[in-house]
Image: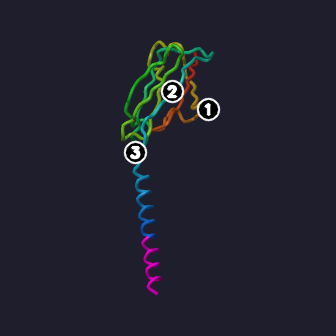
Amino acid sequence: MANTTTLSKNMSIRRALICLLAVLFLATVGCKKQDRTTMVFGIITNDINQPIEKVPVEIHGNNGIIASSGDKLTTVYTNEKGEYSVTLDVPKGYHSVEVHAKWYSDTTFVNKYKYSTVTKNRGATRDCCRGEIGQKTQYNFVLIPF
């Protein structure tokens, strides 16, 4: 009888330890720090696939419900191949980043192009131009002339 009681107590202690370890594991996983390193890159060309140099590309951090509730985090410019790339550690408080190819803010480009088209990760998109925190996102822009 004593052996059955001891065995029962040992089983209860094992179950309690397993539950405690499971709780500690889940708590540790839930507290894991999110990698906020975010990369946004792409290329800006015209309608005949020629690269466009010196186009400003702004990256904004979104911190509100609507995308316009963000702050400019950085600006980069396309190189001679029309490429741009930025990697940044997005500060806490921002839930995503927004990419703005600001060709329309420069008279050099505004006088040549009427609108742009965009692809996300090499596919058509209606989700222009949000990048997820901790991810790589490619946005390619094509500027359409008058």
Amino acid identity at mark 1: Ala
Q: Position of residue 114 (x, y in %)?
A: 55, 19
Amino acid identity at mark 2: Phe
Q: Is residue 92 left or right of residue 3?
A: left
Q: Outermost residue, front direction?
A: 3
Q: Compared with residue 21, is residue 83 higher up or lower down, i.e. above or below?
A: above
Rounded to the nearest whole Å, what is the CA distance between mark 1 and mark 3? 32 Å
Specify the label residue 124 is tagged with: 1
Q: Residue at x 39, y 39 (%)?
A: 94
Callout in the foreground (3, 2): 3
| Residue linked to disc 2 | 41
Q: Is residue 6 shown in magenta? A: yes
* Quadrant of the rendering where the C terminus is positioned: top right
The magenta region covers: 1-13
| Residue linked to disc 3 | 33
Closest to the observer, 21 or 74: 21
